Amino acid sequence: MMMNANLTRLIFFAAVLVVLTGCDEDATMPARPLIHDTVPDLSAAKTVDPSRVLATVDGKPINVADIEEYLKNGLKASSAEDALQKVIETYLLADEAGRRGYGEKRDVSVEYKKALARAQLVRTGENFTISKIPTNVLEQEYERQKDRFVHGVIRNVVHSLVVVPEGKEPTDADWRIAQEIQGAVASAQTADDFRKAVAAVQEQHAQAPIKVEDIFPFDAQSKRLVKPFVTGAFAVNYPSERISKIVQTQFGLHIIFIITEKEAENRSFEEVKTSLAKAILPDQRRQHVADYLDKLVAEGHVFVYDEILAEMGSVKGN
């Protein structure tokens, strides 16, 4: 049968591992190998004739003995099928490197093929540079992250919360505790000061449902937070003030401490496209390597003899 989708997918994930770990290494000999962390026990496959062909790549046979040789030379896998997949990948990449004029054709050792395959994969990733990222991909990423580049004033806060059961109104006791927290944090100059002051009140009211939480940065138009909380946070006259009045929401009674404030921004696509490209380059390289391997598999005439591989199907990793 032709190489199935699972085999292609596993080859891709193995390829991604190399690009992630090897792109900043010497391309001719990456420091970390393209392997997993377990070694299969082939004792269950002893009844399979070592000369029997498991697969062919461009007409070149891969037999049981080949798999065993690769395992002896450091290839690690979780099963016989996994080992075969990795050897197929190595053949494809090493052959492609040879076609491009890399390496010494007379050297056909397992270690040489493995090193050549790794180097070819690393080169493929490194050759995909920022300039090769399509403009439409960058534009889509800009739209996806637009809140980062176009926003109003953003505030970063920490807050205390006297929790009130859902659907209930705060009791007098809840209000008294919130007021006590308000007094305790009145002189806080930093977020740590605020947290320590709230913690002191928590110690005095061990049974009271009091929380201290950091909130992700947000602007006055934020839809991810309840409106009374946002309004209360932006009612603080920062930087001359840092602490809000008691703010009531459906969750309870909050006191908000403003940690930092970021000015409003309106950055265009042209202003940020270079930084965006740098940020998404690793993912784009992984996709490029995946497409490259798909192409190799499609053009490599890979054929797997499932009936023979099935005889080794009981082989499992440690």
Image (tube, rainbow, N blue to C red):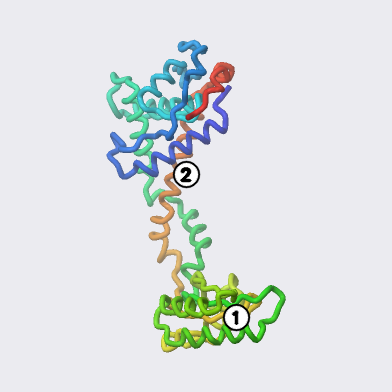
Q: Secondary structure at mark 2?
A: helix
Tell me whether circle 1 and circle 2 mark residues in contact (CB < 8 Å).
Answer: no
34 vs 301, nearest the viewer: 34
**Badge nearest the viewer, 1 or 2:** 1
Q: Secondary structure at mark 1?
A: strand
Q: Is residue 283 above or below residue 36?
A: below
Residue 267 in view of the camera: yes
**Kind of residue indicated by mark 1:** Leu
Drawn side of residue 167 relative to residue 209, left or right: right
Q: Which residue is mark 1?
A: 253
Mark 2 residue crowding within 10 angstroms, few (<14) / some (14–19) / many (20+):
some
Label 1 – label 2 distance at C-alpha: 48 Å
Circle nearer the N terminus (1, 2): 1
Provide residue 201's location: percent of width, then percent of height: 51, 80
- Which image quadrant is residue 66 in? top left
Q: Is residue 195 above or below residue 65?
A: below
Provide residue 44's location: percent of width, then percent of height: 51, 18
91 vs 129, nearest the viewer: 91
313 vs 24, nearest the viewer: 313
**Kind of residue indicated by mark 2:** Gln
Is the N terminus in the top left, top right, bottom left or bottom right quadrant? top right
Q: Is residue 246 above or below residue 293?
A: below
Residue 263 in view of the camera: no
45 vs 65, nearest the viewer: 45
Drawn side of residue 31 relative to residue 68, left or right: left
Outermost residue toward the right in this view = 167
Drawn side of residue 239 relative to residue 215, left or right: left
- Which image quadrant is residue 121 in? top left
Mark 1 residue crowding within 10 angstroms, few (<14) / some (14–19) / many (20+):
many
Marker disc for residue 287: 2
Identity of the residue drawn at 65% across and 76% down: 164
